[in-house]
Image (spheres, rainbow, N blue to C red):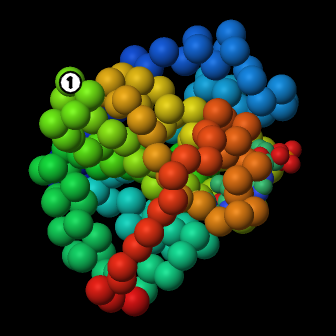
Amino acid sequence: MMASESYLFDPSVLTSLNWSLFRQNDSTGMATIQDPSMLAPNLRLRPLKSDDHRRSYVQLLSQLTIVGDISESQYVEQFKRMKESGLHLVVVIEDDSKQLIVGTITLVIGYKFLYGTAPQGWLENAVVLKDYRHHGLGTLLVNTVKLLSIKYNVYRLLLNCRDDLISFYTMFGFKMEDNMMAVRFWE
Ligand SMILES: CC(C)(COP(=O)(O)OP(=O)(O)OC[C@H]1O[C@@H](n2cnc3c(N)ncnc32)[C@H](O)[C@@H]1OP(=O)(O)O)[C@@H](O)C(=O)NCCC(=O)NCCS
């Protein structure tokens, strides 16, 4: 890694996760990627890096929602904000053979004065590049956020998704709870 590059969080956090939980309890019953050791040799699970704009991270996000034009300097500024907060754990899968980010997911940690100060987590921005879908990468990403949540003592992990993805998240133990409401200040 060049001196100017940095990880959003310590990569050893990912290797230290309790991956055996999924090896023992594959509740999905699918032949899919439960932990990073099952990835193809060219694929690597790691935290977001400060120079991932060059590896098409933003283009990947545009397969999820409207991203707009985000320059490399805007990306780096946002990366710094996230790193300083320590509350945004953005994980990516890189295809080393192409220097391309092919999947990502984020755990946002929210501290509260509830549940003995245990944080609440939000699973956000889950997306796998079109050509790489249906090979288990989405499963690996959701498993990663679940293990990160356990590591950070998150008492409840929330997400917001379209109707057609309810069956996907149900496979990972998510259940419908409450209602989500939103007020938009900006479209
Ligand atoms: C949702 C998404 C991340 C799944 O990634 P993936 O790498 O294809 O997921 P997996 O290969 O681990 O899928 C495992 C199983 O989940 C189910 N599944 C996958 N994508 C699904 C979808 N979009 N809808 C419903 N079920 C889905 C299938 O049963 C799949 O098994 P199969 O490939 O044998 O059919 C991917 O489809 C994606 O990026 N979609 C666009 C962005 C998006 O909508 N993200 C979610 C925001 S909340």
Query: At label 1, which amino acid type do we have?
Result: Gly
Q: Is residue 145 above or below residue 181?
A: above
As rendered, which of 52 and 23 lies closer to the eye? 23
Q: Is residue 163 above or below residue 8?
A: below
x and y percentages locating residue 2 in the rendered image: 25, 48
As rendered, which of 134 and 5 lies closer to the eye? 134
Name the residue located 51 percent from the left edge and 69 percent from the top edge: 61
Q: Is residue 152 above or below residue 51?
A: above
x and y percentages locating residue 68 in the rendered image: 42, 86
Circle 1 packing at 10 Å, graded few (<14), some (14-19), many (20+), is few
Report which residue position mark 1 lands on: 116
Name the residue located 70 percent from the left edge and 42 percent from the top edge: 170
Name the residue located 68 percent from the left edge and 10 percent from the top edge: 24
x and y percentages locating residue 134 in the rendered image: 80, 50
Q: Is residue 141 above or below residue 50?
A: above
Q: Secondary structure at mark 1?
A: helix
Residue 111 image-quadrant placement: top left
As rendered, which of 4 and 69 lies closer to the eye? 69
Residue 39 falls left or right of residue 48: right
For residue 47, say whether it is visible.
no
Quarter occupied by the N terminus: top left
x and y percentages locating residue 87 in the rendered image: 24, 45
Name the residue located 33 percent from the left edge and 39 percent from the top edge: 120
